Amino acid sequence: MPDRKFRDDPLPRTRPGTSPEPDRADGTEESDAERRRRRARFLRDLAEARELRDRVQPRRAKTARLRHAMRMRTFRW
């Protein structure tokens, strides 16, 4: 598919709970860089899911865009 965007994600997809990293329940502190990396991956996945949903359900996406535009027009600063 030519319109598909490939990510530079070096880690393979895994299901929650089956990650190769040890569980954080033991109280060890993760580094800021690792936390930011996980957060960036989560936000990329979230954006990808939104794009997929908008592509699969165009009517719902259009309605959501119009509703958001109406909220922004009626918002008072």
Image (spheres, rainbow, N blue to C red):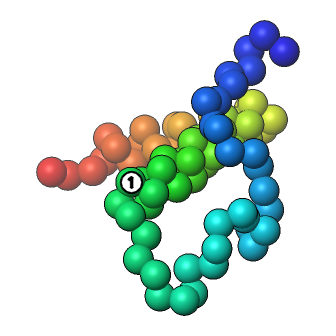
**Disc 1 marks which amino acid?**
Ala
Tell me residue 76's x, y (percent): 20, 52
- Look at 34% across and 44% down and name the residue there: 72
| Label 1 neighbour load within 10 Å: few <14, some 14-19, many 20+ | few
Q: Is residue 77 positioned above or below 4 on the image?
A: below
- Of the 4 image quadrants, the one containing the N terminus is top right
* Residue 20 percent across, percent down from the top left: 72, 63
Q: Residue at the location (38% across, 64% down)?
A: 31
Q: Nearer the viewer, residue 74 or 58?
A: 58
The residue at the far top in this view is 2
Residue 32 visible in this rendered orientation of the protein: yes
Between residue 36 and residue 67, name the one nearer to us: 36
Q: Residue furthest left?
A: 77
Residue 23 screen position, x and y as percent: 63, 78
Relative to residue 4, is residue 32 drawn left or right?
A: left
> Looking at the image, which residue is at 73% across and 41% down?
53
Which residue is painted at 75% across and 45% down in the image?
Answer: 12
Q: Which residue is labeled 1 in the image?
A: 33
The answer to whether any part of residue 63 appears in the image is no
Question: Taking 42 as reference, is 61 above or below it?
Answer: above
Horizontal and vertical percent position of residue 21:
65, 66
Viewer-nearest residue: 35 or 58: 35
Which residue is at the far bottom? 26
27 displayed left or right of 72: right
Q: Secondary structure at mark 1?
A: helix
**Quadrant assignment, res 58:** top right
> As rendered, which of 60 and 42 lies closer to the eye?
42
